[in-house]
Image: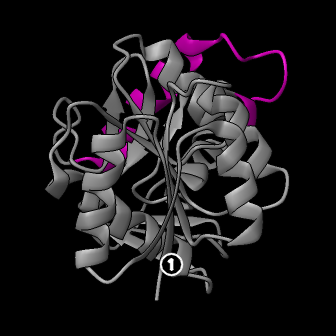
Amino acid sequence: MTTVLVVDDEPQLLRALSINLEARHYQVHTASSGSDALTVAAAHPPDLVILDLGLPDMEGTEVVAGLRGWTDVPILVLTGRTDSSDKVEALDAGADDYVTKPFGMDELLARLRAMLRRAGAKDEQPVVSFGTVSVDLAARRVTRAGADVRLTPTEWHLLEVLVRNPGRLLSQKQLLLEVWGPGYETARGNLRLYMAQLRKKLEDDPARPSYLLNEPGMGYRFQP
């Protein structure tokens, strides 16, 4: 049985999430503060964490950092804040995805299923396919409709990071650090330029991409 830790200081939401998850055969542990969340997680290691960013005793990002000190369990953050900087900070701290309040239960459950599928895919697929594109991670080769696609080293590195994290929203800072390295955290123009180049080479309609998606002000997501 999949164990989920739900952390929120709103009793009604905590109860609603628990009821919905238990009805779908998840084992649920709950906490209403950051310190309780870390204690419960240590006593009952979860398979997945649903975490509200607005907690009474500490920032949700501190809880994410505390969990990331010892576990790579998927973390979905909940936030009622409209400022994208809070979401970006949570992603940079190690969260895997976010949902903005108010949210539909169907959307949240779909996000959870996707995160659990990714976490369960322990044997990485050497070849990732989407549309007519095939990305061979081992051979570092990309084809489209059977024809080789020439990528620059930077384009390849960016594509590799994205396809190794299917469905996961990666913040701009994460991608800049991973692909360009320290000192480039604010070079968003680089990221926009190379994403545009990848879309031109791999998407059927670069202006309306189906696989290399952007969430304005947040980051990018590879959606196979």
The magenta stretch spans residue 186: yes
Reply above or below: 78 against 36: above
Residue 32 is situated, as x and y percent measured from the top left of the image, at: 53, 42
Magenta stretch secondary structure, dominant: helix
Locate residue 80 relative to residue 65 in the image: left or right: left
Query: Residue 148: which quarter of the image?
Result: bottom left
In the rendered image, the vertical position of residue 171 relative to residue 70, given as above or below: above
The answer to whether residue 87 is visible is: yes
The answer to which of 143 and 73 lies nearer the viewer is 73
Query: In the image, 121: left or right of 108?
Result: right
| Res 199 → quadrant | top left
Q: Position of residue 55 (x, y in %)?
A: 55, 28
Q: Residue at x 23, y 65 (%)?
A: 20
Q: Is residue 207 left or right of residue 123?
A: left
> Is residue 179 in view from this perspective?
no
Q: Secondary structure at mark 1?
A: strand
- Residue drawn 57% across and 72% down? 47
Q: Nearer the viewer, residue 14 or 213?
A: 14
The quarter of the rendered structure image containing the C terminus is bottom left
Q: What residue is disc 1 on? A: 127
What is the count of numbered marks?
Answer: 1
Look at the image and give the residue range highlighted in magenta. 177-203
Q: Identify the coloring.
A: one colour
When the figure is inspected, residue 114 is found, relative to residue 158, above or below; the finding is below
Q: Amino acid at mark 1?
A: Val
> In the rendered structure, does residue 110 fall within the stretch colored magenta?
no
Q: Residue at x 66, y 43 (%)?
A: 94
Task: Point out residue 220 in the picture as x, y percentages from the top left corner.
Answer: 43, 36
Whole-percent x, y for residue 149 in the image:
45, 56
Instruction: Please tell me which residue lies in front, 8 or 165.
Output: 8
At x 58% / y 24%, what residue is drawn?
Answer: 56
Q: Residues within 10 Å of mark 1 (few under 14, many from 20)?
A: some
